[in-house]
Image (spheres, rainbow, N blue to C red):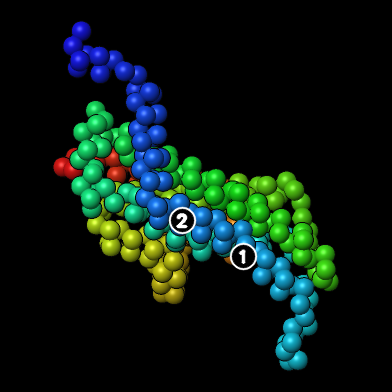
Amino acid sequence: MTATTRSTAIPARLRLIDVITAERIKFFTLRSNPILVSVVGALIALSALPSAIALTVPSSNPGAAVNTVTSVDSLRFVDTVLWMQIVFAVIAVLYATSEYTSGQIKLSLTAVPSRIPVLAAKAIVISVIGFVVGTVAALIAVCVPLLILPFGDIAYDFVLGYALLLSVASGIYLALTGVVALCIGALIRNVVVAIIIPVAVFSIVPSVLESIGNDTITMLTGYLPTVAGRVILTTFENPAGLTAWPGLAVLAGWALVLLALASWALRARDA
């Protein structure tokens, strides 16, 4: 049996596991990646602290309207995920494009018989990191007010099941936005352009399109990745009428479509 025959006889599942391990090592070898991921998690978790403190401090403005809020729920304390998605998107783009910048992508593609496992492994690594960081940080965020709000006049309507659901949804949301950004990076390959596109699509483009005032355009805006996915983490209505889980499903659809396009592009062009 030749070396070639022995190589092709290795189970595809084992190869993918090996590639995932290699991609995980690559991600954490670059010192800035764990630092930025830690910053994302810390800001999501700790942002609930000033928000909760603000609810216990009466307004010092004598002209301010009387506060009619008597209770809040966990949803109020996870909205920082929607801001930190931009930072996580940049992390994902750099993860996808750094090997092209350094030229190491040729080594990665040479080591793996098929190109698809390399991209699939990157998507798995970034989605697992996003899910873990988003879930844990959001869970801390919804628990922090339990230490603060009892000292004020506003009740905290904390329901464990709902808090866990929001935490898991936060993790799923961050994971999917990470995959979307990763695939954009893999498609574009240019670091600057690849960063600009998800940042614009996630934050600027929706506001611009909605400001046009056309009903059809406004409705279609509701199907943009983060506009659809964020419904589960905010009280704002979706322009297309999407509710929580259907909106998250639309975001997942974007991730799958872009993953398929990035896979096709990776196979069709030179490294």
Q: Amino acid at mark 1?
A: Ser
Looking at the image, which residue is at 72% across and 89% down? 61
Q: Which residue is mark 1?
A: 47
Looking at the image, which residue is at 35% across and 54% down? 93
Q: Is residue 256 above or below residue 6?
A: below
Q: Can you give x and y, in whole percent of width and height, for residue 125 in the image?
A: 43, 41
**In this picture, residue 52 sits left or right of residue 182:** right
Looking at the image, which residue is at 29% across and 35% down? 116
Q: Which is more N-terminal, label 2 or label 1? A: 2
Q: Can you give x and y, in whole percent of width and height, for residue 96 in the image?
A: 32, 49
- Where, quadrant-wise, is the C terminus in this rendering? top left
Q: Which residue is mark 2?
A: 35
Q: Can you give x and y, in whole percent of width and height, for residue 90 in the image?
A: 39, 58
Which residue of the protein is positioned furthest toward the top in this rendering?
1
Asked whether the beta carbons under mark 1 and mark 2 sit within 8 Å of each other, the answer is: no
Which residue of the protein is positioned furthest toward the bottom in this rendering?
63
